[in-house]
Amino acid sequence: MSNINRTMKSTTLIVIFAVSFVSMSCTEAFNPKGPFQDRLVVFAILTTVKDTQFVRLYRTYDPPGFNPLEHTTDNTVDSAQVSISTNSTVYQFQDTTIVREDKSRYTNDIRAYVAYPFPVVRGQSYTLDIQTKIGETVNANLTVPLPATVTISNSAALQNPRPFRDIFFTVNSRLYDRTRGFQVRVFLEYDILENGIYVRRREEIPTAVSNFIDCHTFLPAYHSLERRKSIQPERTTFDVFAYMAALAKIWHSNISFDVRMRQVVVELTEFDPALYSYANIMKGFRDEFSIRTDEPDYSNIPGGHGIFGVMTKQSLVVPLPDTTGSTLGCQNL
């Protein structure tokens, strides 16, 4: 019994000593916010999809509490000099306003800088130059990836899918070395007669479907942003059954209309290293089973925050007969 008492006394002394040590060591109150740094924030993403380019400038902010959503002022930086140059051409950006669709947090429209016409050229290098009215300067550079080579394996399945029902067709993308990430999307384009006029529509083809009940009820899967794996062509597979489900959906959703199939369009979107890193990190670390609350950041803006990157897009078109898939049933493909 005396041994038990001695053990309990020793344990009590250890606990008291540990608590006293911790109390003496903690001289400052815990502050989860950390020190605030006033920085310029730049969002400049070039694209080959259109010949209008935008740049948005902001300042960092210090919310009143611990929740950043409590800050409801859009800290736009105006009256800055913004330009992007390539070789001997300089594109000067002008002030503009973009309608903000969601005004649940910020009630004002979006202030931005715009340059038009500004066609982004594959293989060219571009330099971003910014000077704010308080004398801050920002310089950043990028190189636009050259076009990829896109081909389709088993393209016969697109013309006549029924014999290939249980296999797949493959989109092969040979990417330029400046491409870090990519995404493949495939669409069915068709014309439908409405009020005497043929209107072009499109339906995205899933990579695969599950829980299939009929052509209106299934769970589709789509290709998402993916990091390139090697210098070899990247292979993205699409189940022919998923293609047949998309065809049947079109025909049986428009059974009382004049429908004419037109083509399959393969869209390859490429991300340069900066934009891929930004997009990948911003979408990462969302583990619902993790207790970590920190979220990493990415920036390639020297002396500030934000992103100067480029996104390119190219298409491959496969023509289709007008009646492709018209004989497919909705439940029995």
Image: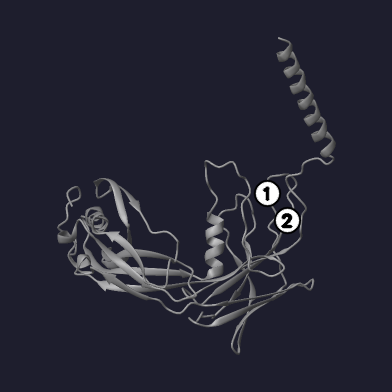
In percent of the image, x 68 and y 45: which residue is there?
Answer: 67
Q: Which x, y percent locates residue 12?
A: 76, 21
Is 127 in front, or is 328?
127
In percent of the image, x 73 and y 45: which residue is there?
Answer: 32
Q: Residues within 10 Å of mark 2 (few under 14, many from 20)?
A: some
In percent of the image, x 22 and y 59: which residue is there?
Answer: 167
Q: Which x, y percent locates residue 308?
A: 60, 70
- Write down the residue under mark 2: 61
Q: Which of the two discs, 1 and 2, labels the residue nearer the N terminus? A: 2
Residue 299 visible in the displayed image:
yes
In percent of the image, x 80 and y 26: which residue is there?
Answer: 16
Q: Which mark is residue 306?
A: none
Find residue 90 and report its image quarter: bottom right
Q: Which x, y percent locates residue 111?
A: 64, 65
Q: Residues within 10 Å of mark 1 (few under 14, many from 20)?
A: few
Disc 1 and disc 2 in contact, CB within 8 angstroms:
yes
Numbered label tally: 2
Q: Secondary structure at mark 1?
A: helix
In the image: residue 42, left or right of residue 311:
right
- Write down the residue under mark 1: 68
In the image: residue 147, left or right of residue 212:
right
Is 53 in front, or is 231?
231
Q: CA distance from mark 1 to mark 2?
A: 9 Å
Q: Is residue 291 above or below residue 225?
A: above
Q: Amino acid at mark 1?
A: Pro
Q: Amino acid at mark 2?
A: Tyr
Is 42 in front, or is 118?
42
Q: Which x, y percent locates residue 53?
A: 56, 74
In the image: residue 223, left or right of residue 43:
left
Residue furthest front as drawn: 3
Q: Secondary structure at mark 2?
A: loop
In the image: residue 208, left or right of residue 285:
left
